[in-house]
Image: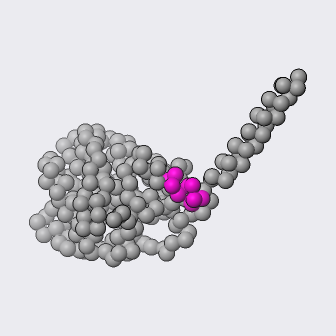
Amino acid sequence: MKESLMTSLIIGVMMVLSGALTMALTPTTRVADQQERFDLEIMIPEKFGDWKIDKSILPLQVDTEVQTSLDKIYNQTLARTYVNSLGEHIMLSIAYGGDQSDNLAVHKPEVCYYVQGFEIIKTFSDEVFTQYGKLPIKRLLAIKGNRSEPITYWITIGNKAVLPGFDQKLQQLRYGLTGSVPDGMLVRISSISFDESKAYRLQVAFIEDLLLTINTKDRVRLIGTFET
């Protein structure tokens, strides 16, 4: 009888401690609330380098159900198509969310394109070597009918660009252990092309031109900071 009572007491204490620990480790401070406000429409210039907006072409549009889901995740979104003097097009899509906890994780292009009827033929991790450091990126090849769309994207969690998946979760955990909820950004760059290598080279050139144009504060928001 005494042994049964002792077991019950121990279980009760463990449950209380577990609840207290969960509350203590639950992030409560939103990093976004401590930062200066910004506007993606202003942050990303309409014209830079050899690029300007082509308003006749829009990036991939999502259906109403998906858009409703995205509206719950992100505070700001930006979708533009740019064209250069050679007539080459780049589609740029950026989504910013002030809460990148597990409940509001970034919406990956793999999912977004799949629900729009695309088949994801390839997916692999890579890096873009910028003058500011190595930017970890994910590359996809999405096919739908006669449309072939090579895609480059990256995610920032707080002040660091990370690969989706393990690195993303690890960065969220780092903030969580300090009691903070990080903000996050997903930047997607794509083009319609059957020549993957050429498309990815063009996308890298676009990234480099964009990073050279925006100021340091906006650049850090877009690609994070790099360890030296």
> In front: 207, or 225?
225
Color theme of the render: one colour
Q: Is residue 166 visible?
A: yes
Which quarter shows the C terminus?
bottom left
Q: Residue furthest right?
A: 1
Seen at 30% across and 59% down, the residue is: 135
Seen at 63% across and 52% down, the residue is: 25
Instruction: Say whether residue 201 is left or right of residue 161.
Output: left
Q: Residues in magenta?
A: 172-180
> In front: 19, or 211?
19
> In front: 159, or 103?
159
Residue 127, by quadrant, is bottom left
Vertical arrangement, residue 82 with respect to residue 117, above or below? below
Tell me where residue 131 appears, x and y as whole percent: 24, 68
Tell me where residue 153 appears, x and y as whole percent: 31, 54
Q: Is residue 52 visible?
A: no
Q: Is residue 175 magenta?
A: yes
Seen at 88% across and 22% down, the residue is: 1
> In front: 51, or 200?
200
